[in-house]
Image (cartoon, grey):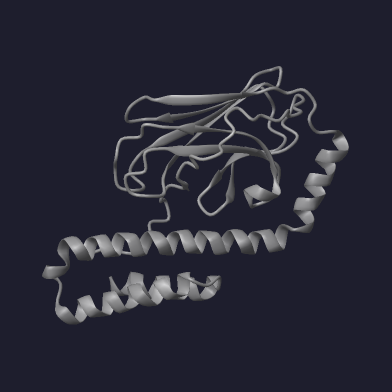
């Protein structure tokens, strides 16, 4: 029923962390006539997804559409980061906010448009809008010298020094996200149309699903990719 992983699948944002979210906990950020560091958000698996790249001339505005990581997920937490590392936790967090009231839908269906809008004074407005309902939340981040030139230089050098290891970590997370998506869609397809599939084929698909689930318990990206490929072929 399901042919492989769609490479254009939208990046998902994890479910909102309800407890202990410090609303409007915003750090200052230094912006000159260009963005000294990349700006973006944390997406599924802790990855830093850039929205505005380093050295972009301001004023500037850029949007990207994301989706949900779980079925019937009714909220997303938008965590804003600045830096050059591949994983969000290794960058500087600038603030976070929740977009609530997303109508129940299968994961990957809702369209959440995240927009970064930087004015000439270097003030960053980050908004998230649910395209189905028009609901929107935003945060303003003031540019008043939170990072010195030395801080910025250190962060850039740090990213260069860790580039290889970071790339591997990001690839491992991406492999896991894709595998998890394929397991989810295959199980759903089997539940809906499994009775129409020949017993031997169904068993092959179920075996491939369980092998991939087993691989997902570990962190071996190559094993996960191989089992993902096997399941894609089987289904």
Residue at point 52%, 29% (across, down): 115
Q: Is residue 225 visible?
A: no
Location of the C terminus by quadrant is: bottom left
Taking depth in this image into account, of 33 and 128 the one nearest to the observer is: 128
State the count of labels: 0
Image height of 144 relative to 90, above or below: above
Q: Is residue 201 visible?
A: yes
In the rendering, at what x and y percent does residue 225 appear?
47, 71
Residue at point 48%, 63% (across, down): 176
In the rendering, at what x and y percent does residue 180 appear?
41, 62
- Extreme-right residue of the structure: 150
In the rendering, at what x and y percent does residue 17 appear?
50, 42
Residue at point 42%, 51% (across, down): 8
Taking depth in this image into account, of 36 and 91 the one nearest to the observer is: 91
Image height of 194 relative to 47, above or below: below
- Extreme-left residue of the structure: 196
Image height of 109 relative to 230, above or below: above
- Horizontal side of residue 29 vs 20, given as left or right: right
- Horizontal side of residue 36 vs 112, given as left or right: right
- Horizontal side of residue 194 vs 151, given as left or right: left
Location of the N terminus by quadrant is: bottom left
Residue at point 66%, 49% (across, down): 89
Image height of 108 relative to 24, above or below: below
- Horizontal side of residue 186 vs 230, given as left or right: left
In the rendering, at what x and y percent does residue 234 appear?
30, 75
- Extreme-bottom residue of the structure: 200
The quadrant holding residue 126 is: top right
């Amino acid at each position: 029923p399901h042919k492989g992983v769609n490479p254009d699948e939208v990046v998902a944002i994890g479910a909102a962390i309800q407890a202990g979210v410090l609303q409007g906990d915003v750090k200052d950020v230094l912006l000159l006539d260009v963005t000294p560091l990349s700006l973006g958000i944390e997406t599924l698996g802790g990855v830093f997804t850039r929205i505005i790249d380093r050295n972009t001339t301001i004023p500037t505005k850029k949007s990207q559409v994301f989706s949900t990581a779980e079925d019937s997920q009714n909220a997303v937490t938008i965590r804003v980061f600045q830096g050059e590392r591949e994983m969000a936790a290794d960058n500087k967090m600038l603030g976070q906010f929740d977009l609530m009231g997303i109508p129940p839908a299968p994961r990957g269906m809702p369209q959440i448009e995240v927009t970064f809008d930087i004015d000439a004074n270097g003030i960053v407005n980050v908004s998230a809008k649910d395209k189905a309902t028009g609901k929107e939340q935003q945060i303003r981040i003031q540019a008043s010298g939170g990072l010195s030139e030395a801080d910025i230089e250190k962060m850039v050098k740090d990213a260069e020094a860790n580039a290889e290891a970071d790339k591997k970590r990001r690839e491992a997370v991406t492999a896991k996200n894709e595998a998890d998506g394929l397991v989810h869609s295959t199980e759903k397809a089997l539940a809906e149309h499994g009775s129409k599939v020949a017993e031997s084929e169904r068993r092959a698909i179920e075996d491939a699903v369980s092998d991939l689930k087993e691989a997902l318990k570990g962190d071996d990206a190559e094993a996960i990719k191989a089992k993902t490929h096997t399941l894609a072929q089987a289904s």
